Image (cartoon, rainbow, N blue to C red):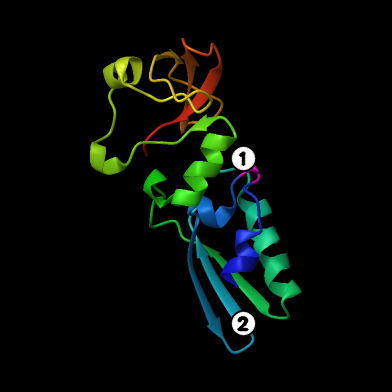
Amino acid sequence: MWRALAGIPDPEIPVISIVDLGVVKNVRIEDERVHVDFTPTFMGCPALETMRTQMEEAIRGLGAEPEVEVVLDDSWSTDRISAEGREKLREAGFAPPAPRSAGQPTLIQLERGPFRCPYCRSTDTKLENVFGPTPCRSLRYCNTCRQPFEQFKTI
């Protein structure tokens, strides 16, 4: 069942699956029914129903009856992104977030921190805009290879 769910790409960033992104929290199988608990990356996620529908279709494709529940009492964290997911993000040109154990970055840290470019791996990067295309990303620029890239914020 986990393999089937791992084949579902994130609707916003299709290089990473919903399992690698860490939104699938739990899978339980009871007789012919498969219960999936998932937590979206943020409460107003416009892809919520798309993800639910794709999970239900994947489960039905294996001959089981789906029961997909959105868990709203457990907030998603970037720490849930798997190691494989982080590498997939890097390969696609996204800088993965730092672990939460490193502490929530402040604006000063975002501006001056040693964020590594996903293209050339240089740390000679600068913050272009703290507000990226989604609440969890900011825009950075690499002074070495001169490529813009998105930096995932630690959430």
Q: Nearer the viewer, residue 118 or 26?
A: 118
User: Which element is circle 1 on?
Assistant: loop
* Vertical relation: 133 (above or below) 80: above
Q: Is residue 60 visible?
A: yes
Give the vertical position of 150 relative to 72 (above or below): above
Earlier-in-chain disc, 2 versus 1: 1
Local packing at callout 2 (Cα closer than 10 Å; few below 14, some 14-19, many 20+) is some
Check if residue 68 falls in the magenta segment: no
- The answer to whether residue 13 is left or right of residue 83 is right
Mark 2 and mark 1: Cα distance apart in space: 29 Å
Residue indicated by mark 1: 13
Residue 31 in percent (x, y) is at: 59, 90
Residue 41 visible? The answer is no
* Magenta span: chief secondary structure: loop
Give the magenta range. Answer: 11-15
- Residue 119 versus residue 49: which sits nearer the camera? 119
Q: Secondary structure at mark 2?
A: strand
* Residue found 25% across the figure and 43% down from its top: 101
Of 88 and 81, nearer the camera is: 88
> Looking at the picture, does residue 152 appear above or below residue 56?
above
Which percent across, then down, holds residue 130?
Answer: 43, 19
Q: Amino acid at mark 1?
A: Ile
Residue 68 is situated, as x and y percent measured from the top left of the image, at 58, 67
Dividing the picture into quadrants, the one containing residue 99 is top left
Classify the position of the N terminus by image quarter.
bottom right
Which mark identifies residue 33? 2
In the rendered structure, the answer to whether residue 20 lies left or right of residue 5 reads: left
Residue located at (55% from left, 17% from top): 148
Q: Residue at x 46, y 60 (%)?
A: 71
Quick one: 51 or 87, which is closer to the camera? 87
**Count of picture labels:** 2
User: Could you tell me the amino acid type at mark 2?
Assistant: Arg
